Every structure is written in C-alpha cells, then in structure tokens.
Amino acid sequence: MKNQIFVCIIFLLCHGETFKCASGGVADSVSVSVMEGDSVTLHTDVKTSQQEEISWYFDDTRIAQITGDQSYICTDVQCNEGTERFRNRLKLDHQTGSLTITNITNTDSGLYKLVILHSSSDSVLIFTVAVQGVPAAERDEIKRKSVKEGESVTLDPDVRKNLKNDLMTWYFTDTLIAEITGDQSKICTDDQCDERFRDRLKLDHQTGSLTIMNIRTTDSGLYKLQISSTNLRRHSISSIKSFDVSVISEYNSM
C-alpha cells in the first residue's frame, strides 16, 4: 500500500530503551520544507499531562524530552552528553512539548520522530524536514537605509506570496511597533503597540511594508520584521528580515 503509512510496532533505540506503538497504531507523517536560517516549530497538537512523556529524536538520537509533570526536561546535550549538534538552537514548549529549531542549517535536514507515551497507549509522529540553502550573499542580509531627518522612509520586505494566514510583526530595537495578521483580524501600529512614533507609522495591509514619516535622528537603528506562517499542518515557519536605518541630521547635511 504505497499511499498509506502503516506502523504496527516502531522501535526507537536510545540508550538501550525501546518504545513501541500500541497494537495497530499508525505513525502519521508530515513533510516540512524550510529555508536555511529560518526557524521551524514542530507541533505535537497535545497538552501535556502527568500521564504523558514526550520524546523527540533526530535520526534516532534523542534530542529533547519532557515528562507530563515536568519532573524531567532535557534538550540537546542535556539528553545525550557529547551530542551538541544543535548548539542551543532547540526550544521545547513545556505546555505542549512542541519543538522549535532556530537558525536552521542544511545539516538539520532529516527525520524527526515524536514519541508520546500515554498511560493507556503510545503514539508516533514523523516529520521529514528538508532545509533549502540560501545563497551566501543573501544569508543574514541586512538592508541599509539612509534618510534625511524630516523625510519618510519605507521598509519593504519584498514579500511576494499569499500572506492570508501569516503574522507580520515589526520591531525597533526589540520593541514591538507594528503588527498585522494576513486576514487583518489584528492590526496595530504606533500608540496601539508602542507610543514612540506618535502617529508617524503607516502599515501596508497588503505587503506588510512599514513607512516611517517625519523621521528623526532618534529613529536610527535596527528594525526587524518577523513573518510567521501559520497555515501549515502541524508545523509553523518564521523568518526575519532586518533593516538598518540611518537618519542624517539636517544640520549635518548642510
């Protein structure tokens, strides 16, 4: 049966431990494609309880684990001494057991297995993660903008895709200044998010572009846009675009 994934018993070996699916259990499978440097969250779709234990494996090596009562939690090297491939790039949600891999690299491509041990049955979910490379010239690219004091500047993320279910969040020096959901159910700018810019921000609801009007020298600094895709089944992807804005004083330009 080529189009069906069936697993009666799955053996996951880690330090001599063997986990089995419940008799007749089915291992669901999810394919994930992500760009190098982005973040991806692999969702469990469960809320942990004291009767559950959640374990994550990468190529059959345990990389994260949490018990329902949170008496034991580990990620990366904490789970397996000497295994540091993710180097503090793993985040484990203590409420759901979902796993986030930040700043993902092409060496992170492969098979991830989620094993949930229930009091009455076990379940397994398999994620096949494919990381697509990004040209070196574009990796960690920061767009630089230079503008005279009093003028306006538009920060354009140059996103050409369906943003219907995406969350776009703008930050200035790590402070939230603008936010919009693709379906526009939530929009905030300036005083609704932060009062620093005082009615000087305009957010394009179609592209997510941010315009700063009557710009001041105190507006110089790093602006970041985080785009979170939420329309993907059992996983979500976040990417960040950065803009370094330099405001030239009118006195210096004379």
Image (spheres, helix red, strand yellow):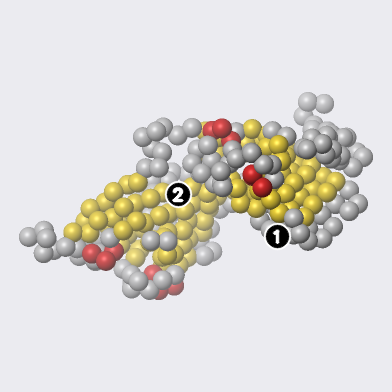
Disc nearest the viewer among 1 and 2: 1
In the visual, does 77 lie left or right of 46?
left
Above or below, 219 against 241 in this view is below
Seen from the viewer's position, the closer of residues 51 and 191 is: 51
108 lies left or right of 7: left
Query: Going by the image, does 189 lie left or right of 200?
Result: right
Residue 91 pos. (x, y %): 61, 51
Q: Is residue 202 visible?
A: yes
Residue at x 47%, y 53% (from the top left corner) = 226
Image location of residue 171, percent across then percent down: 41, 60
- Determine whether 231 is above or below 20 in the image: below
Near mark 2 (Cα within 10 A), the count class, few <14, some 14-19 or many ≥20, is: some
* Quadrant housing the C terminus: bottom left
* Disc 1 element: loop
Q: Residue at x 49, y 47 (%)?
A: 239
Q: Position of residue 56 (x, y in %)?
A: 71, 44
Quarter of the rendering containing residue 124? top right
Q: Residue at x 75, y 46 (%)?
A: 55
Q: Which residue occupies 74% across, 59% down?
A: 70
**SS for dot 2:** strand
**Around disc 1, counting alpha carbons within 10 Å, would you say few (fewer than 14), some (14 to 19), or many (20 or more)?**
few
The correct choice, above or below, for 186 with respect to 87 in the image is below
The answer to which quarter of the image holds residue 9 is top right
Marks counted in the figure total 2
Where, quadrant-wise, is the N terminus in this rendering? top right
Q: Which of the numbered marks, if any, corresponds to residue 95? A: 1
Q: Which mark is residue 240?
A: 2
Kind of residue indicated by mark 2: Ile
- Residue type pointed to by label 1: Gln
Image location of residue 248, percent across then percent down: 18, 59
Whole-angstrom CA distance, mark 1 to mark 2, is 25 Å
Side of 82 relative to 69 (left or right): left
